[in-house]
Amino acid sequence: MEEFEDMAMTSIRSIIPGIVLLAGAMMLNAAFAQEAKNPVLARLGNGETITEKDLTQYVGRRIDLKAVARNASGVTTVVQEMALARALALEGQSLGVPPRSEKGDTRFDDIYAHTIFSKISPACEAPKDEAAVRDFYDKNPKAFTLPTAIRLSRVILPAAEKVDGEPAGTWLMNQVQVIGAGRQKFEDAARRAEQAYKLDAQGDLGWVMLNEENLILRALGDANQGDIVGPVKDGDFVYLFQVAEKRPSQVVPWTEVSAVAAKRAVSYCREQARIDVQQRMFQKYGVQLDENAVRSLFEAK
């Protein structure tokens, strides 16, 4: 009997760890499933997360951001703003600044965040006289540098749209081949696309400044005059671009900016202050954005 009990106990001991592991795995799987339904887009060092649900609620009350949050690049910008609001809120607590008493979104309180931002940012004032303005111009050429500019034409279609019976991406690829063979012009494709989709401008967009914040514009920086780029899918849309002309980056001469240089000194100071504050706050509060999770919001559609 004792031998049997020993054997039974041995069997139980060998089974229980498996049950514990299985239960643990089930709990982890449940957590992963929950996170998959509400992906984490950013994390803070204190354990906080910013999820897709947070993003949806935030954009829902920030109508000005709805047009921005149409693609992965725009959503990344919005999540950065949300993360900065949270970091500034934590900084405000550390400084002993009481939260606002008004009802509303107390977690992503933009007004409170702006208050803290103003407290920890340098005051941006215009240079006092013409000599000081000129001195600022000479010492800060980056503030007066125009980025590379291109004269850009575009075709934009919802990825789910069909044109002439073909999916938007396939139709645009066919247009590249037809244009390359000289059988039609880019403008012809833009006019045909406009018949299918009218909510955004098709064709010539005029001169567009390239910048590093927008992933698509950054990619166009390597294109040469006359090049066709695409199809490119970003978010719910697919694009085709043509670079008609290209102007290299250049510092604007003093004679052309002297009248507005004082105002530019103030705006440049504010731009740099935001960059500096964001870097400091993100480092201090361990903010990490998950750009792969942001892209997955659109890839899953």
Image: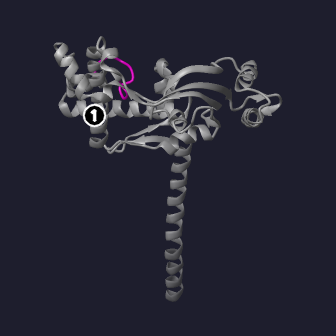
Q: Quadrant of residue 300?
A: top right
Name the residue at 53% across, 66% down: 19
Colour mapping used in the image: one colour
* Image coords of residue 27 (percent x, y): 51, 54
* Image coords of residue 290 (percent x, y): 46, 44
- The amino acid type of the residue labelled 1 equals Asp
Q: Which residues are magenta?
A: 100-109
Q: Nearer the viewer, residue 42 or 69?
A: 69
Number of marks present in the image shown: 1
Is residue 234 at least partly visible in the picture?
Answer: yes
Q: Which residue is mark 1?
A: 276
Look at the image and say whether residue 174 sits in the magenta stretch. no
* Image coords of residue 121 (percent x, y): 22, 27
Q: Nearer the viewer, residue 192 or 186?
A: 186
Q: Is residue 241 left or right of residue 295?
A: right
Q: Quadrant of the C terminus?
A: top right
